[in-house]
Amino acid sequence: MELSKIMESSEYVKSKLNKLPEIGIILGSGLGELADFLEKKIIIKYSDVPNMPKATVKGHAGQFVCGQLNGKNVIMMQGRFHYYEGNPMELLALPVYIMKNLGVKKLIVTNAAGGINKSFVPGDLMIINDHINLTFNNPLIGKNDEKIGPRFPDMSVSYDKDLITLAKEISAGHGIGVKEGVYLMMTGPNYETPAEIRMARILGGDAVGMSTVPEVIAARHCNIKVLGISCITNMAAGINDKPLNHAEVIETSNTVKDKFETFVINIVGKM
């Protein structure tokens, strides 16, 4: 991603804000209502931001929402971009670089995911402790600008251990049961086959989805600490012989939104 484009996009967003954010939050499918809790809210449509693609998936509003959440200045992505929408992988990194230029130091990345681990049930929340990239692509491929981040960023701690510890403490303190595991990304947009899910389990995946990994790679590239949370909206293909569809993803997200919102709001307050 060219630095000039990142700066152009960042300056536009910055011009609309009264206070710069310290925490970024990316909201996955069906989880966008968390933005309703923001105070002193400022909405910036992606379509108004230079160089930004459009969010085309149902359940993704397609806008930045900025304001205060539990005493912290935050910027939320209410809707994200996906590789399967035809976006170049490097473009998926742009919102993260914008956040970095606005002053964001910590990022909460959320998603709706299919459960690979057979101990999971729909409605579980999973703290991501690592990921597997099965897209065979990467947002950092191409020319690197050292002003953004290093040519070869370290991914040995993609998800910050202190933030994981904090999330566990919040879950215990509020009686919110959480799982922990490895998120595996495939390109989509089709759901995985049963054979692919068996492969994913052998590789060590606990949940599968079509997002998150490019954003986390970009965040680590520019030295933003990451906390990842998956909402398990369905069991992956072949586990219970139930056909998969996006309506189920949204429906399950809606049933757990109160738990999810309580979890994230309290995490933000302690970050």
Image (cartoon, rainbow, N blue to C red):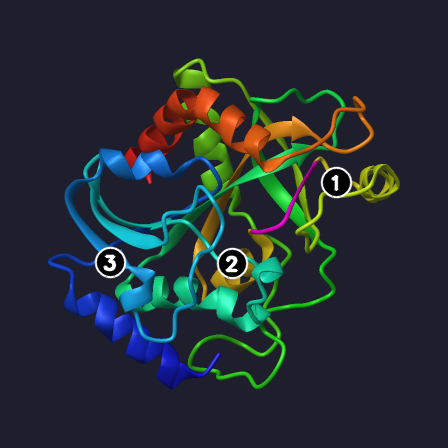
Q: Is residue 51 visible?
A: yes
Q: Is residue 236 above or below residue 121?
A: below
Tell me the quarter of the picture where residue 68 sits.
top left
Q: Earlier in the sequence, mark 1 or mark 2?
A: 1
In depth, the one of 242 and 50 nearer the eye is 242
Q: Is residue 140 above or below residue 20?
A: below
Q: Earlier in the sequence, mark 1 or mark 3?
A: 3
Instruction: Name the residue beneath numbered marker 1.
Output: 205
Q: CA distance from mark 3 to mark 2?
A: 20 Å
Instruction: Name the residue beneath numbered marker 3.
Output: 44
SS for tag 3? strand
Can you give x and y, in whole percent of width and height, for residue 42 in the image? Answer: 17, 51
Tell me the quarter of the picture where residue 84 sits.
bottom right
SS for tag 1? loop
Label 2: few (<14), some (14–19) or many (≥20) C-alpha neighbours in 10 Å: many
- Amino acid type, callout 2: Glu
Q: Is residue 123 left or right of residue 16?
A: right
Can you give x and y, in whole percent of width and height, for residue 191 in the image? Answer: 72, 43
Instruction: Give the magenta part as a residue range.
Output: 207-211
Q: CA distance from mark 1 to mark 2?
A: 18 Å
- Amino acid type, callout 3: Ile
Q: Which label was assigned to residue 215?
A: 2
Can you give x and y, in whole percent of width and height, for residue 219 in the image? Answer: 48, 61
Can you give x and y, in whole percent of width and height, for residue 121 in the image? Answer: 65, 20
Label 3: few (<14), some (14–19) or many (≥20) C-alpha neighbours in 10 Å: some
Q: Is residue 126 visible?
A: no
Q: Main secondary structure of the magenta part?
A: strand
